Image: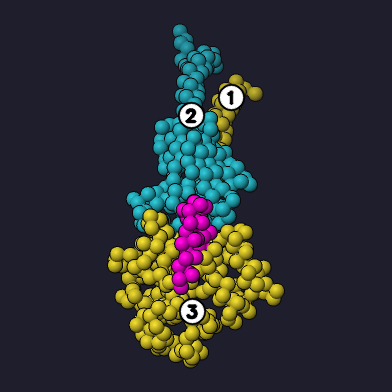
Chain colours: A yellow, B cyan
Amino acid sequence: MSPDHASTGSTSLVALTMLILMAAVAAGGALLLQAAFAYTSRSSTREDLRLSLQKEGERMAGLLARDPTPDADSPMDPIWGQIGSPGIRDVSITLEDASSRLNVNWAQKAIFEKTALGQLLRHGSTAQELQQRREDRGISPDIAAEYADLIKEDALPRYFTGYGYANLNVTDEFALRKLFAVRMSDQAGAEVFHMRLQQALIQKKILKRSDLREFLGLDYGKLFPLMNAEPVFNVHFVEPLILGELLSLPDLRIPQPRHIAQVILDSRDRQELTSEKLRQIMGAPDDNRIYQYLGVVTWFWKITVTRGSARLELIVARVPTDDGRAPRFLIVEERYYS
Amino acid sequence: MRTNTRFFSRRNERGSTILEVVVALFILSTLGIGAWYAVGVSLRLADRLREKMLANVRLLQLDDRLRGLAGRVYLPYWAPDGIVQTGDGALSVPYLDGDPKKELNLTFREGTLSVSDGEMSTHYTGFPHVELSAATNDSSHQYGISVQLEGKDGRRVLITARFGATPLGSLSSQ
């Protein structure tokens, strides 16, 4: 090899080494950047999809709040027309009344023992067991996990719910005691509250909205609207079986309950019923307990927004007020599946 | 007289080659030093970039984990106010997966933030200062958790993660 060649060769070797070193550093950096960008991009895409579904769900909740007839909720409300035309493409929306079913956490034994609704319980299960379950394990938001062994499989999603306010006049007294203890974190206070409740039951007193502040006393601010005196079921959305059986409760002494149930079912298909109209149809005296069960307002809604394999479920609560102001709508639960 | 006009004779070429080699070595060493400095700067830059990217990725992972876990907290609508417990570098909230006995726990001890769902605990380092608190609205109604982190570079990041479900709140918090 000539000296010229040797000189050229060694210069190339230094340059080559430098180049390889720099290339290795650059390649390492590029790989790291690529991995970081990929993670960021994946995270961003997931978040964008979720945000778009959330936006649509919140739009629907906003429509619920802007109902032009806030004193009654029915399939004639404008929101039902909006469901078929979502704000974004490839999205489907469903809306359902989540509270006009039997609230398994609050329901009284008599509902099952004195009507055909008892057939919704599994063979061999009793209303007593249901009540005892609540005493033993406490009230639970997950009704499928907690009560599936007591209630028939097909009946649980159709006729039962875990969402709804506890109307003091028609909620199981022991469930109310449990609710008080959880809400107020006060077991001794719950016993006192239970005694007060039992006195009202003995006197067969129907608590009205105007009685709540006095009855709940100093705890009113924390217990209302969770405990209230609002009708539980919206007749526009309640299952015909529940409607018919509630009207047939022997203690309520409603004349011709089957006929009245049919009149309500026929009417709700044609028009939005008002409280006054419903009272006219039922024709019971003002102090009848049926008005604690049946009304025209939905308290909890379930909105489901689906896009591809992603699904967002929102539970929206209508929060009643006690000062004549318009009710508020609050998203109390949000479940996202993808 | 015969003059030597062969400037490019082999003898001259040899002499020039030594000079050329010295010059070439000087140039090469200058280039080498320059290249070495450039490599050093690039390496430091790459290292800083890598550190920043890793810190951001760690932050994103923590953000994902916190949001995922907070989203699994389903407080029933009848739950009392002020259910998030904080204090002494720790935060806990029940009703993870809707179960009152299961808790989401966050602790910050000796520079390590631990996030646990009772089954799996994940640890995050690189934050000299972390503050844990309940996320509240204007009416002090708790709707999630807030984690304020301070990085080694003094950068502050606030992560607020909403619960999957929140209680109705009392009249005073509405």
Q: Is residue B154 above or below residue A63?
A: above
Residue at figure coordinates x 47%, y 12% from the top left? B4
Counting labels gives 3
Helix, strand or loop at disc 1?
helix
From the top left corner, tell me how far across and down residue B95 is, in percent. 54, 53
Helix, strand or loop at disc 3?
loop
From the top left corner, tell me how far across and down residue A60 is, in percent. 40, 69
Q: Which residue is mark 3?
A: A238
Q: Are marks 3 and 2 in contact (CB under 8 Å)?
A: no
Position of A15 compared to A298: left or right? right
Per the rendered image, the range of residues in magenta is A175-204
Q: Which residue is mark 2?
A: B44
Q: Are marks 3 and 1 in contact (CB under 8 Å)?
A: no
Q: Which residue is mark 1?
A: A10
Helix, strand or loop at disc 2?
helix
- What amino acid does circle 3 point to? Val
Tell me the quarter of the image containing the C terminus of chain B: bottom left
Q: Is residue A65 visible?
A: yes
A199 falls in the magenta region = yes
Q: Residue furthest top?
A: B1
- What amino acid does circle 1 point to? Ser
Frontmost of labels 1 and 2 is: 2
Q: Nearer the viewer, residue A72 or A132?
A: A132
Looking at the picture, do discs 3 and 2 lie on one chain?
A: no
Separation (CA) of disc 1 from disc 2? 28 Å
